[in-house]
Image (tube, helix red, strand yellow):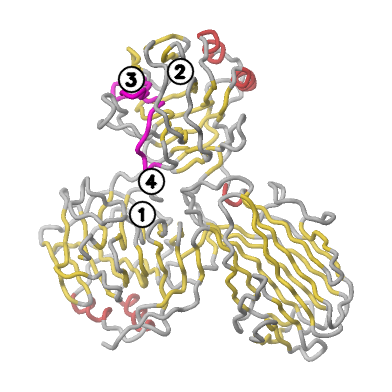
Amino acid sequence: MGSRHRRSGRHFVLLGCFLAVVAIIVPAGILVPNAFGGFAATLAGQGSSGAGSLVESSSSVAATCSSSSGLTDTNVAYCAAPLINADPLPTTGTVSSSVRLSNGGSLPSSYSSISPGSCGLLALADQVGNDTGVASGGLTTVQGGPFGSGSASTGFAGSSGNIQTVSEVTNPQNFAVAGWFETSTSGTILGFSGAQGVTGQYSNDRSLWIDHSGHLVFGIYPGKVVELTSPGSYDNGAWHFVVASVGPLGGGLWVDGQSVASNSSATTAQNYNGYWHIGWGAEDSTYWPDSPADPYFLGDLAGVAVFPSSLTGTENAALYSSSSWATYQARILTDGAQSFWPLNDLGLSNYNGNVAIGNAMSDLVDSVDTAAGLGSISYQQPGPISGSNSILTDGASGNLTTTGLISNPENFSLFGWFKTTLGGTIIGFSNSQGIIGQYNNDRSLWIDPSGRLVFGIYPNKVVELISPRSYNNGSWHFVVASVGPSGASLWVDGQSVASNSFVTTAQNYNGYWHIGWGAEDSTYWPDPPIKAYFAGNLSDVGVVSGVLSSADAFALENSATEGGFVTLAKSYGASQLWPLDDPYVNTLCSLVGVTIAVTESNGIASCVYPSSPSPCPQPSSAITLFSPGSESLSLPNLVPSASESLSFTIGELAPIPMDAIGLHLNVPITITQGNSGFKASVIYQTQEIVL
């Protein structure tokens, strides 16, 4: 079949937050970074000839521009020069980088203009269907592919990188999945589950993974757990091709064109709708006996496809034996794939569709401790009092997690409005953000399976304060729970329903508040919630530093308006207060700001965006990449030795939710050199991928 070698390819790193500078439009050559982290570009050959070049000053690698016609300027040249600038945008704060534009001859007056920026998710194309894959976490595009020259792949970091599809798929049955993989360790290649993202999973099967011993496993659930496991190992760092299928003849697993495992009784998979995940799976040892060591894949993936029926042995062998990427792709299409993700994307395409991303929920007291809304949440629902709104969580994935680490809350009160018929956790405290990595949790309020309200605390032993009656009746109720020198207490609708005078402290650890989700389970808590996620409405949830009196609790519950409630909560010493009345917004787009300055040859810097005197202000909510508008700045005539530097400052305006899906942000900068010269478009592009 001929050897297949991995090539280094052109890397586009999406690990943490990285910045890229691109001069665009027609591909012509590659510029490499100079010592200053940007690139120096020379516009030459001005005049009526319409020919010129964009030259990197330190290496003299030329990217020749070709003339275009039919534009405003008669002779306009566009160049393309991809460049990696591997300065990461930190978790919080700002980072700066510069692009120096120098000319090689005398030119007429010129100007710089900033076009509106764009914002969206990193798109991984489905070349057959319309089920785009979107990136999350650490990915590296344009890695070496399984067919050597002419093919490429996407690299997965093994701790966060994954791709999820955006469209819900109806219960795949009689199907096949196929793809190329290269790895040296255990992890999930492809999986199917009931929820987007990596949280809120309740059903999962149809998964391909590498186990602890390097065996390939295909996990399906036709009413019981079935694992088809290869006898050989494939974690040897070489490229391998896998096909797994379920159909009338049973389940089958093929590797490198050969059948390695089958089960004639596995003719169906589990009955549910869900989403395909590439590079991540929800399998764990609770349900799958031979689960992967890590749900994330570490290695490279390419040419992943889903077919609406099983593939024959001949089709499997033909796909594996393809002599080139073009042949493989043609056979994928001939075999009738319904989705095909080549995973050879350059990492420069935006997806602006509807996918689950974090939504900022404001804290009216502590602006730093924003809560990030994740999963399925309906916003601006009717609230319990005049002028209030609420959120509606689905009981399966919707939840909020705070962004700031909180130091061991003691002598505190929790309060909030809730409405439910099912139950779940209203608010809880644990050591970890998100819903994984939990080892400490208490200070939690939940509805148990009988509809009773429970306040769980751990003063070196498990203590549950339980209401005698149920509150899962679909009506609004107001709850207050506190721990202080006089003990612990639980109040509902202005009435004391449970107390314990011996509980004067909670567990000693630092952590995060979670709204609509909790880490309580039956291993430690005798009366845990029916599910971790809350199903119902929540409004005006908060924390007070100190113990609320019965009069305080009564006054809060009987506030006539939302404004009055907020005023009272603040007067009682609220340390956090989330009204939960925020509208849904594309949070990530609004959390990143940019300023751009130009420094002329005389050393004088002017702020181009926004239009303001030098120095430019720090990025703010008024200056975002989502829609910066159009600004322009006229520059003086240039002379052969003159140069201008464009300096970009990119900054996060607030902490970005940990579980957020990857984002593309860019601001195009256009530099025009006279009516008869050249136009170079420089896109300063930020790939925002949150781990």
In the image, the segment drawn in magenta is 435-464
Sequence-first disc among 2 and 3: 3
Q: Is residue 498 visible?
A: no
Residue 464: mark = 3
Q: Kindly check if marks 2 and 4 are in contact, taking CB atoms under 8 A apart as contact.
A: no
Between disc 1 and disc 2, the foreground one is 2
Sequence-first disc among 2 and 4: 4
Residue type, mark 1 in image: Tyr
Alpha-carbon distance for marks 1 and 4? 13 Å
Q: For the residue labelled by badge 2, is the local secondary structure a helix, a strand or a loop?
A: strand
Residue type, mark 3 in image: Glu
- Residue at horizontal 70 percent and vertical 48 percent from the top: 620
Residue picked out by circle 4: 199
Residue 242 in the image: above or below residue 29 = above
Sequence-first disc among 1 and 4: 4
Sequence-first disc among 4 and 3: 4
Alpha-carbon distance for marks 4 and 3? 27 Å
- Residue at horizontal 48 percent and vertical 48 percent from the top: 658
Q: For the residue labelled by badge 1, is the local secondary structure a helix, a strand or a loop?
A: strand
Residue 275: mark = 1
Residue picked out by circle 2: 482
Horizontally, is 572 left or right of 312 in the view? Answer: right
Residue type, mark 4 in image: Thr
In magenta segment, residue 450: yes
Q: Position of residue 408 (x, y in %)?
A: 47, 30
Residue positioned most to the bottom: 49
- Residue at horizontal 61 percent and vertical 48 percent from the top: 591
Q: For the residue labelled by badge 4, is the local secondary structure a helix, a strand or a loop?
A: loop
Residue 7: mark = none
Sequence-first disc among 1 and 2: 1
Q: Position of residue 494 (x, y in %)?
A: 48, 10
